[in-house]
Image (cartoon, helix red, strand yellow):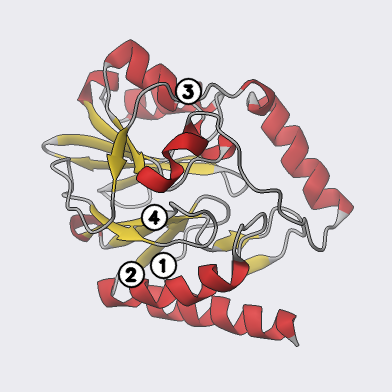
Amino acid sequence: MKLTPTIHRIGNDIVAAYLVTTPEGITVIDAGLPGHWNDLLAELSAMGKSPSDIKGLILTHGDSDHIGFAERLRREHGVPVYVHASDASRAKGGPQPKTPMGPIKLGPILGFAAYSIRKGGLRATHLTEVIELQGGETLDLPGAPQIISLPGHSDGSIAIYVPVADAVFVGDGLTTRHVLTGKSGPAPAPFTDYPDQAITSLPTLVATHATWVLPGHGAPWSGGVESAVRAVEASAASTAR
C-alpha cells in the first residue's frame, strides 16, 4: 500500500511493516509476521523492485510480531538487520518479561489471534545475526534513517525518523489501534514492559516535527507527531484516574 511517494506499508491495521523507498534503494522498517513475506514480495513487484533493492532492515524492537521475515531476508538476500543492543537477545529468542494484558474485548483479541495465526505467528523465526544499535545513530541506508531511543515498551525499543519521508516510525512506542480492545486513536500500546517509561519517552519524538507517525499496530497517523504524543499522554492520564 502506497502512503506517499516515499512510504509503502505492508500488512494492515492489525500488524504492519513499512518500506522507505528512495533512488538509492529501500529501507524496510519492521518485519511483521512470517507470512508478510509474500506481502513484501507483492509490494516490491508492484513498485517494480525486488529484494535486491533492499539495503537494510531496522527493527523497532525484538517482539515476535515485528521480526517476522527478518531472518529470511537476511539469510536469503544478505540484507543486514539492525536492532538496539538492549533488544538483540529478544530478537534472537531470548527471555522477555511477562506483561499483564489489561482490558480486552473478545472480538478484537480473536481477530488479532486469527490474523496472527494466518500470517504464521506461531512459527516465528528468530534472528541469528544482527547489527546492534545504541541510539542516536544516522544509518547509511536509503532515507538516512535516524535512530531515536524510545525505551518503555521494551528496554531496546526505538523510533526511526526519516526526514525525506517526513515520518517517524514508532513500532509499539504507541498504537493507533489497540489490538486487545479495537479502540482507535493514539494510545499507549499493550504488552508494554514499563508503561510509565513508555509515556515519558514519547516527548523525544516531538523534536522531529514529523507529519507522519507510523505504528506497528493501527492506522497511519498524518496529523503530526506532537498531536499524536499529546493524545497518548491524555489517554494514559485518563486510564490512570
Q: Between marks 2 and 3, how big is the CA–CA gap?
A: 28 Å
The residue that label 4 is drawn on is: 158
Of badges 3 and 1, the one in the foreground is 3
Tag 2: residue type? Thr
Classify mark 2: helix, strand or loop.
loop
Marks 2 and 1, the one that precedes in the sequence? 2
Task: Write the residue at 76% across / 57% down.
Answer: 100
Label number found at residue 127: none
Say few, some or many: other residues with alpha carbon within 10 Å of mark 3 (under 14 / 14 to 19 / 20 or more).
many
Of badges 2 and 4, the one in the foreground is 4
Label number found at residue 37: 3
Q: Between marks 4 and 3, how big is the CA–CA gap?
A: 23 Å
Marks 2 and 4, the one that precedes in the sequence? 4
- Placement of the C terminus among the 4 image quadrants: bottom right
The residue that label 2 is drawn on is: 211
Classify mark 1: helix, strand or loop.
loop
Q: Position of residue 51 (x, y in %)?
A: 29, 21
Q: Do the residues bearing badges 4 and 3 touch, measured as CB atoms within 8 Å?
A: no
Label number found at residue 222: 1
Residue 127 appears in the rendering: yes
Marks 2 and 3, the one that precedes in the sequence? 3
Specify the farthest residue to the bottom: 241
Q: Between marks 3 and 1, how big is the CA–CA gap?
A: 26 Å
Tag 3: residue type? Trp
Task: Write the residue at 31% across / 60% down.
Answer: 148
Q: Position of residue 41 (x, y in %)?
A: 40, 22
Classify mark 4: helix, strand or loop.
strand
Marks 1 and 4, the one that precedes in the sequence? 4
